[in-house]
Image (spheres, rainbow, N blue to C red):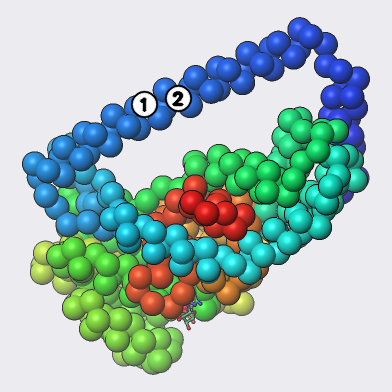
Amino acid sequence: MGWLTRIKDSLLSKIRKKIPKKDLESVEKKREEKKILKEKKQIVKKEENEVKKENLVTKPEKKTFFGLFKKKQKVEKLPTVEKDPTEKKNWFQKLKTGLFKSSEKITEGVKKIFVNKKLDIETLNNLEELLIMADLGPATAEKLTAELANEKFDKNIKPDEVKAFLAKKIEESLEEVAIPLILDNSYKPVVVLIVGVNGTGKTTTIGKLAKQYSNEGKKIMIAACDTFRAAAVEQLQIWAERSNAEFIKGNEGCDAAGLAYEALEKAKEKKIDVLFIDTAGRVQNRTELMEELAKIIRVIRKLDSNSPHHCLLTLDATTGQNALSQVEIFKEMAEISGLIVTKLDGSAKGGILLSLAEKFHLPVHAIGVGEKIEDLQSFEAQEFANSLMGLEK
Ligand SMILES: Nc1nc2c(ncn2[C@@H]2O[C@H](COP(=O)(O)OP(=O)(O)OP(=O)(O)O)[C@@H](O)[C@H]2O)c(=O)[nH]1
Ligand SMILES: [Mg+2]
């Protein structure tokens, strides 16, 4: 923490000494440029939405939470998901309730720190500590605190203003990783490999995704390549039945890679749209796990050299900072294409999303706030940031 404090102190002393006018002007200029760039982006986004809406009218397609299947030839014309407003509102309320433990911790802390006080060094240190405790990661905590100091040092600031300020900055930090899962339907099937530590939600996530895509009319197959536990196969079979998906299993303890190969072969034959491959998660035996995963990937590539088209890592938010080392470990074994963060409802560590973004910049495709099918949704920076700060949308 020493170096953090030193950096911040030097920043604050700069502010106190009154930054030379010339510098202030250049800061102002940069801010203005940033604002203009943002406005331009919003205009482009608005125009894109108009185009998407037009496409929705001329070419109706069923909606999904995770983006529609891309068509290779007409990618730019494809309508992306526009959530139904009521559905969106319900999800926001659910997310807010789910993130209550995390938001309560932060907002209560902010209230305690900012009681009728001018923004001084002590307040900033306390805020930084609070953000670190909420798992936002040291660099993000320091950045947010320094930005607040830059704008409001020595001024009175109310807890609600702090929350709104943080929400905006958190949204900005998360925007780059909030990327929906878009399946490219030129692959038949699109192969989605799910990896992660025990109990992080791999099987449940497959079940939820399978159901959501199946509701869109996609043909789904699920391969139970966690062949070590009979119970794991049964659990997955139930999800497969719910989503009307084809289900491939082997004998207990059979070779997971062999089963994955067989599944892909069958999926090709049956013209399946999406093949989900469940895997066993055992970090305690790293070498074995590493070999097994590598073998699954090697073997399915014999049938489709681009597969798996997505390799998703599930992370349990309740484990907090431990999620970071899980990403490190799995990145060594496979090319992780995106993250799914589950159990945000049971966690006071929602800030972990910021730590993950800060460290890995990997797309966060979806977040889970419960065990039901509809409790897994695409990750959106603004609604997450507002929920984390306990704000209304
Ligand atoms: N509250 C909550 N529970 C969840 C969420 N996602 C999954 N779970 C629960 O977490 C438990 C473990 O989920 P699984 O899907 O079995 O996890 P897994 O990664 O397949 O576990 P292994 O097969 O043991 O490696 C189950 O009881 C799920 O219902 C979530 O977003 N919120
Ligand atoms: Mg499982």
Distance between the alpha carbons at the discs numbered 1 and 2: 6 Å
Quadrant in which residue 211 is drawn: bottom left
Q: Mark 2 — residue?
A: 39
Task: Give the numbered dot on residue 275.
Answer: none
Residue 230 locus on image (x, y percent): 39, 92
Residue 334 locus on image (x, y percent): 46, 58
Residue 138 locus on image (x, y percent): 74, 49
Q: Mark 1 — residue?
A: 43
The answer to whether residue 122 is above or below residue 13 is: below
Residue 155 seen anywhere in this rendered image of the structure:
yes
Residue nearest the observer in this picture, 74 or 377: 377
Verify CB contact (< 8 Å) between mark 1 and mark 2.
Answer: yes
Q: Residue at point 24% right, 52% down? A: 68
Packing grade of label 1 (10 A; few <14, some 14-19, many >=20) is: few
The answer to whether residue 220 is above or below residue 334 is: below
Q: Residue at point 28% right, 33% down? A: 48
Residue 261 seen anywhere in this rendered image of the structure:
no
The three-letter amino acid code for the residue at tag 2 is: Glu
